[in-house]
Image (tube, rainbow, N blue to C red):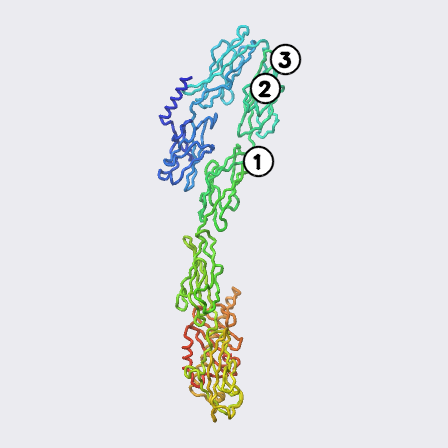
Amino acid sequence: MTKRMGYRDWTLHALWWHHFFLLWSTIDGQTRYTIPEELKQGSVVGNVAKDVGLGLSEISDHKLSVASVAGKQYFTVDAGKGELVVNDRIDREALCGQSVSCVLPLQVVVEDPLQLHRIEVEIRDINDNSPSFLTKELSLKIAESAAVGTRFPLESAEDPDVGSNSIKSYTLSKNECFVLKMKEVENGKTVPELILEKSLDREKKAVYQLLLTALDGGNPVMSGTSQIIINVLDINDNFPVFDKNVYKVSLEENSAKGTFVIQTKATDADEGPNGDVEFSFGARTPDTVLSIFDINSLTGEIYLKGELDYESATSYTIEVTAKDRGTPVMEGHCRVQIDVADVNDNAPDIVLASKPKPVRENAPAGTVVALISVTDLDSGDNGKVTLQLPKGSPFSLKPSFSNNYALVTSGVLDRERFSDYNIEITATDSASPPLTTKKTIPVRITDVNDNPPLFSQPSYSVYLKENCVPGSILYSVSATDIDFGENAKISYSILDSKVQDVSVSSYVYINSDNGSIYSMHSFDYEKLKVFQIRVQAKDQGSPSLSSNATVNVFILDLNDNAPTVIYPSSAVLGSLSHQRMPRSAKPGHLVTKVTAVDADSGHNAWISYKLKQATDASLFTVSLYTGEVRTKRAVYEQDDSSQSLIIEISDDGEPVQSSTVTVSILLEDGLHEPILDLRKKSEPNKKSGRITLYLILSLAAVSVLSLVTFLILAVRCIRSSRGSDSCCMRRSDFDDYKNPNRNLQIQLNSDGPIKYVEVLGGDMMSQSQSFRSCLSPMSEYSDFTFVKPSSTTDFKDMMNVLDASLPDSTWTFESQQVSRSIK
């Protein structure tokens, strides 16, 4: 025995020095290696990196890993060389039992990109196990009357090795009465039988001690022995005989406890106690069988007392013994083959072979998300599994090989709609009824910059009082971006544009972080009424996306200008105006008319006149709204010939702004009334006629322009109203600013003491064309008081130009025809 074991060790050692026999081949696209069992840890199986198509420089980049389907990590991958090496002891008998073929399936996972390769390692058997008997000593009782040729079944030896290393033969120690024969049973298996070759004579020899030796076919040969003790009995010379040598039955694995399995039958030709038969399981029946089955000793009926599991054992072979009650006891033997029928009692198992990787929302269809495999321990249709995903899911399963699948993208992904998916995979077998397993795989969708920032509204209107403090906030615009992270961070900026030929950035600036717009200096309504800011919101994605919004800034007027007297002209005569009137003037005589304008607008430009101080307050009165100076009574002889009036001109703003003018009136005898003469149909002088003609032509041109403008806007309004409910033009008070985007603005006002119409031409940002006509409703005759270009021209310069063009004596021109055309 010692020599035999030494020889075995030497053989294994030689195998190591010859680097053992190694084969690899590709079958159906899979790599297979063949190695002997019991290799040392660290032994190289093969270069798996090379076999899956990776170069030596790519090994570390692709992160090779290996997983064993068997559950235990028998192999690992050398990260430096890409070699598959042995990680743990490999015992073929523990892995595959008596199976002739022993193949370990491995899954090699390659990352970046994610790939799965199937590798099979065939474990070749070595002769590392000796044959062994379950019992080292077997006792047989044989009646002396046993006939020559009677066969007695012996216990078979067991050898975990397979193939040529398994049991090949048996030998029996030399004796005079018994020989050893081999009997073939099902599946080509042979069992030893002891055959009586010569009649027994108890009186000559009552006990036989034989040695049964089992030999395997390994090199060197290994063996195991069992002692057989035969006691020769007297008298009872007939043994029970079964009606069948082998009983076969099929039983479903879900059969309930107590289920009847089969009945064995045996008869004994003897009479009396020698013919009474009792049934039992063989003495060498394993405990696992005894825990599942039971036999009725009187009837031979076998019942199920435990639970069957097809996945643990597909069949059971039980030896049944029938003994009589004679002396000596005679017994007969038979075998019962119980096949376990599979039922669908195992649900499919879904195994995640790789951790799901985040997917970009613009990932193309077919992008691999995760690798999964599915198994079912049942057989046949019970083990055939189909996988399903929820309907409408942007993912699909792509089969690879032997119940392995790749979860790939199949539809459009949008992180803004769904940032995470919990993909429920349903595995269903083909049994009836089927069993189902569900597994949820979480998949995270990563963001790409596919959404521009959006403002809360496309345009904003800001109303700002003039003379604001520089640096004050005008407005805060806000935009949102439904992307994530850097793609959603927004910065604000002002797009360059011109306001009165000056860059808008010189008027305002914006906080790039929060969109707050600040003024850079104070605004003057009389110079700038409205301007436009184009704001851009840009995200920080790559490439960045942006959107624009328009901020319309309307400057609101404040009462920051006092009324300016345009007649009597202070530029020529200073603040003192000399007027003449006859002493014969009647009450209500028009002495003169004070005319003033205010650079402000709206209520701030409503002017009223008041006699603040006079030489004789009872002689003159001043019209509150027209500024006409008239006599209240007739002139008395005792009245001074020189009268002085201080007239205060006030606006209607808050606070009130005012100015004064001093009018000096000389009372003369025999002086005719020039103003009354003007009312007569006398022929005007040439200079006044020219001015009248110019004014009439100007007013006619303005009227025609206004009429044409109204017609054009009406036509455009009718056309656009067919597609929308918007209105082309609105009437509003002077302080309201409507439709800032129109190319032409017409503002009418009929409230208050002053009536006017203001026509603004050009685009919204331009102040180049503006005409304002102011009418006094309190005057007996309407007066054309001021034609104002709405531009940045200095107001006082304009006054000088107007004063220079008017006659010294009077500036007011009255005409019923002009009044009608204006009204």
From what the image shows, is residue 539 above or below residue 381?
below
x, y percent for residue 484: 46, 51
x, y percent for residue 395: 49, 44
Mark 1 or 3, nearer chain start: 3
Between 544 and 411, the one nearer to me in the picture: 544
Going by the numbered disc 2, the residue's amino acid type is Ser
Mark 2 or 1, nearer chain start: 2
x, y percent for residue 45: 39, 31
Q: Residues within 10 Å of mark 2 (few under 14, many from 20)?
A: some
Label 2's element? strand
Going by the numbered disc 3, the residue's amino acid type is Pro
Between 74 and 571, the one nearer to me in the picture: 571
For mark 3, what is the residue? Answer: 273
Q: Is residue 633 visible?
A: yes
Between the C-alphas of marks 2 and 1, the distance is 39 Å
**The N terminus appears in which quarter of the rendering?**
top left
Between the C-alphas of marks 2 and 3, the distance is 17 Å
Between 767 and 279, the one nearer to me in the picture: 767
Q: Residue at x 44, y 52 (%)?
A: 487
For mark 2, what is the residue? Answer: 280
Q: Residue at x 43, y 88 (%)?
A: 685
Going by the numbered disc 1, the residue's amino acid type is Ser
Circle number at residue 329: none
From what the image shows, is residue 814 above or below residue 560?
below
